[in-house]
Amino acid sequence: MSEVGKYRIKQLSIFSENRPNRLGAVAKVLKEGKINILGFSIAEGAGYGVIRVLVDRPEIARDLLTKEGFVVKFTEVLAIQMEDRPGGLFDLTDHMKDINIEYGYGYRNPPYAVLIVRVEDIEKGIEQLLAGGLKLLDGTTFH
């Protein structure tokens, strides 16, 4: 894997009807497969939802969910470490002015926070973030 390639994180995008307990059904499959959820977000549109999940074993999780009838695809995202304090997100985005972010979500991981982003051009994004002195988490953090 290239130096830049190690920062590509495999995120599961799970497509689901917008109805009760779909998140529970996904969580059950992952629990039974002993898959650890490291981060997730839910988006909704036109009667369907997209559950975006970071897990410790993405290939196995995809196979288990697909077997249970879920439509799953991999999406490459970046995980950017940021300071867990007021203004931490602003300081981070100040280094991202030329990067088109398609979507993002964050979580706390004391002593820092993490911003997960899907960007339009992942190679360019990685290069610009690293050149700006930002710390990217590599794929081993999510396995």
Image: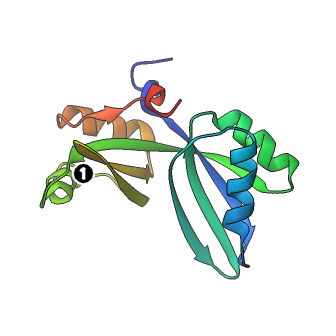
Q: Secondary structure at mark 1?
A: loop
Q: The residue under label 1 is which amino acid type?
A: Met
For this view, does 21 lie left or right of residue 2?
right
Q: Residue at x 57, y 35 (%)?
A: 56
Callout 1 crowding tier (Cα within 10 Å): few <14, some 14–19, many ≥20: some
Q: Residue at x 73, y 34 (%)?
A: 60
For this view, does 93 lie left or right of residue 13?
left
Q: Residue at x 70, y 47 (%)?
A: 30
Residue 20 point in image, percent of width and height = 72, 78
Residue 26 point in image, percent of width and height = 71, 57
Q: Nearer the viewer, residue 73 or 122?
A: 73
- Asked where in the image residue 88 lies, by quadrant, the reply is bottom left
The residue singled out by tag 1 in the image is 96
- Asked where in the image residue 15 lies, by quadrant, the reply is bottom right
Residue 79 against residue 42 in the figure, above or below: above
Colour convention: rainbow
